Amino acid sequence: MALGLDKALGIHPYALSLRMDRTQLLAGNLANVDTPGYQARDIDYRAVLQHTARQLEQGHSKPGGAAESLYRIPYQPSQDGNTVELSVEQTAFAENAMDFQTSLTFLNIKLRGLNQAIEGR
């Protein structure tokens, strides 16, 4: 019986891809911190990952899809309409970077285990 790489790696490749998408959104927010009228965006990571996990459980071969970006509601609205708050974005970016590294570590562990199984160790 053949084991597909998608089944062996589970949700981890999708989690890593979603983290990359979120990194791009957060970096865009940080780059536009002084742009009048810019609306900060983010991804509801947990909801998208839960949806992807359900699709994997149901046997979809290509789960997921584009994650919908949501607008962030600011704690302190600015007069120029910009909703980016530097401290909030920096914190979200740092947390996402750590979570990205964690996802990468899980994926690496899975791949190392598959490699050992192939080599018969």
Image: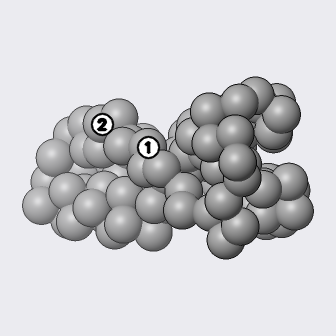
Nearer the observer: mark 1 or 2; the answer is: 1
| Count of residue discs | 2
Q: Quadrant location of residue 117?
A: bottom right
Q: On the image, numbered disc 1 is attached to which residue?
A: 69
In the foreground, 32 or 55:
32
Q: Kindly tell me whether residue 66 is visible in this rendering.
A: yes
Q: Is residue 111 above or below residue 65?
A: below
Mark 2 — residue?
A: 65
**From the image, which quarter does the C terminus lie in?**
bottom right
> Disc 2 on helix, strand or loop?
loop
The amino acid marked with disc number 2 is Gly
Instruction: Out of 17 and 95, give the one closest to the viewer.
Output: 95
Q: In the image, what residue occupies the spot 31% across and 56% down?
A: 52
Residue pictured at 27% horizontal, 61% vertical? 51
Pinpoint residue 26: horizontal percent, then vertical percent: 70, 43
For the residue marked with disc 1, what is the amino acid? Ser
Furthest-front residue in view? 79
Q: Position of residue 19 (x, y in %)?
A: 62, 48
- 119 and 15: which one is in front? 15
